[in-house]
Amino acid sequence: MSKGITTKENIIQAAFDFTSRFGLESLSIGELAKLVGMSKSGLFGHFNSKETLQMKVLEYAAQSFIRSVVRPALKAPRGKERILALSTHWQKWASSKLAGGCPIIAATVEYDDRPGKIRDYLQLLQGEMMNTFSKAAKIAIEEGEFKEGLDTEQFAYEFYANMMAFHVFTRLLRDRTAKQKYQYTLDQLISRASH
């Protein structure tokens, strides 16, 4: 691996950590240059614009989510166990890998009404995530663990909404019972979906 690739990966990791704590909009080439000890012009050579840097951070965050949450969950048996694995790995990823929370969630709120490439990419990411959860519910139906006729899009919505609530209750509200509330809600969701 060349020094340039290693350096760029380290820069993106630092930008990812910064974004987790301060948000995507706060990320700039100038801020990041200070953080990694490079000149602005040297950093600009890697990314060419703030928007390109922000997109690279979102791509990195998405790959981190896939690597830490989706791929390990796919190793679980099809059906309920896979859904529970998605939940467990997502909680672990959100709680341990991110100093200030999920940059994708934060960016989704920051950019929800701001047209442009970043919003378009966030819509794509959110759509893919919802499809992953919906597909997991469809597989649970195929395995005979969830009811035929279950609205898998509604299941995905509630699964996702529960994680968003967990994020807010854990990060913002510092609610010590957030994990129990999350688990209770997940158990209820799975119970309603099951035979």
Image (cartoon, rainbow, N blue to C red):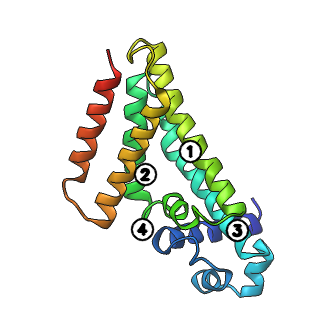
Mark 4 element type:
loop
Q: CA distance from mark 2 to mark 4?
A: 12 Å
x then y, percent, for residue 55: 68, 63
Q: Return the residue at label 2.
A: 93
Give yes or no for contact between labels 2 and 4 (Cβ–Cβ under 8 Å): no
Does the rendering let one see residue 78? no
In the foreground, 34 or 154: 154
x then y, percent, for residue 81: 38, 26
Q: Return the residue at label 3.
A: 8
Residue 15's place in the image compared with 72, above or below, is below
Quarter of the N terminus within the rendering: bottom right
Judged left or right of residue 15, residue 136 is left
Quarter of the C terminus within the rendering: top left
Q: Return the residue at label 1.
A: 66
Q: Nearer the viewer, mark 4 or mark 3?
A: 4
Q: Residues within 10 Å of mark 1 (few under 14, many from 20)?
A: some
Type of residue at label 4? Gly
Q: CA distance from mark 3 to mark 1?
A: 20 Å
| Circle nearer the N terminus (2, 3) | 3
| Circle nearer the N terminus (2, 4) | 2
In the foreground, 89 or 126: 126
Query: Where on the picture, by quarter, is residue 85?
Result: top left
Q: CA distance from mark 2 to mark 3?
A: 23 Å
x then y, percent, for residue 146: 39, 18
Q: Nearer the viewer, mark 2 or mark 3?
A: 2
Q: Residues within 10 Å of mark 2 (few under 14, many from 20)?
A: some
Type of residue at label 1? Ile
Q: Return the residue at label 4.
A: 100
| Circle nearer the N terminus (1, 4) | 1
Q: Residues within 10 Å of mark 4 (few under 14, many from 20)?
A: some
